[in-house]
Amino acid sequence: MAAAEPAVAALPGGGGGGAGAGAPSGTVPVLFCFSVFARPAAVPHGAGYELLIQKFLSLYGDQIDMHRKFVVQLFAEEWGQYVDLPKGFAVSERCKVRLVPLQIQLTTLGNLTPSSTVFFCCDMQERFRPAIKYFGDIISVGQRLLQGARILGIPVIVTEQYPKGLGSTVQEIDLTGVKLVLPKTKFSMVLPEVEAALAEIPGVRSVVLFGVETHVCIQQTALELVGRGIEVHIVADATSSRSMMDRMFALERLARTGIIVTTSEAVLLQLVADKDHPKFKEIQNLIKASAPESGLLSKV
């Protein structure tokens, strides 16, 4: 994470009052706000920008995308709103500060590179076979994506929803070399074990997500990942639901939130990016036959 300290003129401090009851001697109570959260903490009198950043990290480190830039803002009573933290600011009285992520430039959205990408394969299990629309096509494209991940050295995380009742991942899906196969009951794939696995992979910025069901586990996983600052690419031809209505409305909703809805071929070719890539021929062999459209074209 890179936090930008704006070069601005000195501004009035935040909410007045003394150190406040309950704060240890020599410290000042500060309310640290991030996203929808607000957590009080004490900092040493005279604490500056760097100490505030450290405190934000200690309070919200598991939720902060370290690859984004942030600005620290101070609530100024004079203006009745937050203002960029003045240069040289030091805490002298109780106040309220917040950490604000800067917007990613639109020109960078959707960029996939193998070194910063993880594949998520969600709940491709045997008991779903008779219920999921175009499940055979989804399996075929999912296997194509996993082959591509192995060729390009991209980590793969696989979940299985209540495997005791719904069975294991279908035999057609080759899980050789995947980083993690995890049973779950939660619909989202974002479990503590998955977050720990992501933390072990340096520089993760993007997740390529596929599996079932589009409107349940896929949707909830995507929204949680985006909330953690990770860019999500949903592979439309490798995800489905029990009904086409649920599938298509979920894809539309997700696209409107800024999640990238794409295709398997687009993902694989974006990851190699150049015909001179040393693995291009192997990827080309995977996509020589077009992926099945699995009912998508009839709904366009």
Image (tube, rainbow, N blue to C red):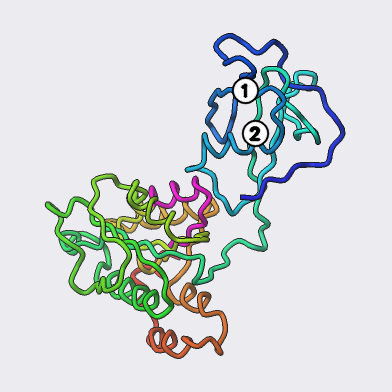
Q: Position of residue 287 (x, y in %)?
A: 41, 84
Other-residue count near label 1 (Cα within 10 Å), few / some / many at <14 / 14–19 / ≥20: many
Q: Which mark sits nearer the N-terminus, 1 or 2?
A: 1
Tag 1 and tag 2, C-beta contact below 8 Å: yes
256, above or below 173, in the image: above
Query: Residue drawn 30% across and 47% down?
Result: 187
Residue of label 1:
30
5, above or below 33, in the image: below
Q: Viewed as shown, does residue 4 lie left or right of 265?
A: right
Q: Residue furthest left?
A: 165
Query: What's drawn in magenta, residue-wise?
Result: 219-234
Other-residue count near label 2 (Cα within 10 Å), few / some / many at <14 / 14–19 / ≥20: many
Q: Position of residue 148 (x, y in %)?
A: 39, 78
Mark number, residue 52: 2
Residue 130 highlighted magenta (yes or no):
no
Residue 229 highlighted magenta (yes or no):
yes
Q: Please, what is the three-letter code of the amino acid marked with disc 2?
A: Leu
Query: Residue drawn 72% across and 45% down?
Result: 4
